[in-house]
Amino acid sequence: SSPAFANGKIYITGMVNGQGVLFVIDKTGKKIKQYEYGKEWETNFPGARSTVTVSGSLAYLYSGLGNLACFDLDSEKIKWHVDLVGDLEGSNITWGVTESVVVDGDRVFCTPGGKTNNVVALNRLTGEKIWACPGLGELSAYNTPLLIKLPARKLLVTMTASHILGIDTSTGKLLWSYEQTNRWSVHANTPVFSDGSIFCFSGYGQGGVKLKLSSDGSSV
């Protein structure tokens, strides 16, 4: 995982004795506190994978096992917890989930990778499902989605096993998809948006693609 910077502090996840741990560090490098958030990935290349997402006093911790926890930094307690594999019929992937969830307004977006709940929006204060997009029913692909704010709508762009997806964040409707395949169904890079175009890059026998996004985000 990579560090996150918020509230004048540094937040980073790790693993101690099989348990995921959120470390809080000040700007001098001194550890302030650490919190356990549950079991972490130990199967292959063990350790924490996802960068914590911090929004105000709440931290969103997504384990390699597919468990999403909302941690209250003030009360130092887990506010809510959702098992995206068990509760939302998702599917984990070979090297464990590495997605960092995206927060916008009252919503948190993530990719369980199931047939029905492929990409979901949850209430960031309660963990309740707001909408579920079936996408194309593919597994997730190790990347963090990109939130694009257009005049007409907000768009969530992510890569699943063999496709790039564009989803309306207000409704969960799949607006468009574009085939992007490689040998291992691994697309570990967050898409980039610039000058009206989306750039996605994959390794393992596949290169980059630049997609021209329509002005309202409804097509590429």
Image (tube, helix red, strand yellow):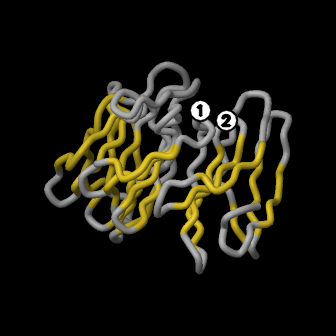
User: In what quadrant of the picture does the C terminus appear?
Assistant: bottom right
Q: How far is disc 2 from disc 1 in space, using C-alphas?
A: 5 Å
As drawn, 183 above or below 188: above
* Residue type at numbered disc 2: Ala
- Name which quarter of the figure residue 213 lies in: bottom right
Residue visible at 38% across and 67% down in the picture: 6
| Residue that sits furthest to the bottom in the current view | 151
* CB contact under 8 Å: marks 2 and 1: yes
- Name which quarter of the figure residue 188 lies in: top right
* Residue type at numbered disc 1: Leu
Depth check, front residue: 60 or 35: 60
| Residue that sits furthest to the top in the current view | 43
As drawn, 217 above or below 200: below
- Name which quarter of the figure residue 40 lies in: top left
Q: Which mark is residue 45?
A: none
Q: Counting other residues with Cα less than 10 Å from the Cα at mark 2, is it few (<14), some (14-19), or many (20 or more)?
A: many
Where residue 167 appears, x then y in whole percent? 58, 56
Q: Counting other residues with Cα less than 10 Å from the Cα at mark 1, is it few (<14), some (14-19), or many (20 or more)?
A: many
Residue designated by label 2: 161
Residue designated by label 1: 139
Where residue 90 appears, x then y in whole percent? 46, 31
Residue visible at 32% across and 55% down in the picture: 123
Mark nearer the N terminus (2 vs 1): 1
Residue visible at 36% across and 27% down in the picture: 86
Depth check, front residue: 18 or 146: 146
